[in-house]
Amino acid sequence: MYGDITWTGYTGMRVPTIQRMIFDQVRRGCDAALAFVRERVASGQFPFGWEVDHVCRTVIQNAGYGDFFLHRTGHFIGEEVHGNGANIDNLETQDGRWLMPRTCFSLEPGIYLPGERGIRSELDVYVSDREVMVYGALLQTEVIPIL
């Protein structure tokens, strides 16, 4: 099993409110995308990569940060980190490939405020014939203060 993980930290004793608020929007987008994939796969309908990106991106746009989400939501994970399968992309290429059973992909939305801060969180997802599983390290639920 291969993986690709990103966590976000803050160097200091207390994470500023704005950092926590932006992280929450990133997590909300990621959670919405994951819920969408789970729902579709459970019904036997495997979504296109662009559809998953659209769900995540819409949450971030609705929070007012759409102009600061500058990359695709995720990518296929194979023997090479960015493999040949469907990417979670409705920004760069509008990937029209389906997520296929027995494959892995990342969900890694980010919000980047120029000259201020950037927040990205990533999780890895395995799709079986009827189930979607998050794997790897524990999921990050908040920005980690680094003392």
Image (cartoon, grey):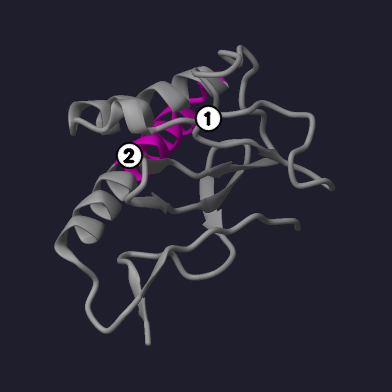
User: For the residue marked with disc 1, what is the amino acid?
Assistant: Arg
Instruction: Examine the rendered structure and indicate whether residue 114 appears above or below residue 27.
Output: above
Q: Which residue is mark 1?
A: 72
Quarter-of-image position of residue 68:
top left
The span shown in magenta is 29-48
Give the prevailing secondary structure in the magenta stretch.
Answer: helix
Instruction: Examine the rendered structure and indicate whether residue 136 appears above or below residue 102.
Output: below
Distance between mark 2 and mark 1 Cα atoms: 12 Å
Q: Nearer the viewer, mark 2 or mark 1?
A: 1
Q: Residue furthest right?
A: 79
Q: Secondary structure at mark 1?
A: loop
Report the quarter where the C terminus lies: bottom left
Q: Is residue 45 magenta?
A: yes
In this rendering, does residue 51 appear at all?
yes
Q: Residue furthest front?
A: 115
Residue 114, percent across and down?
36, 41
Q: Which residue is mark 2?
A: 29
Q: Is residue 13 left or right of residue 103?
A: left
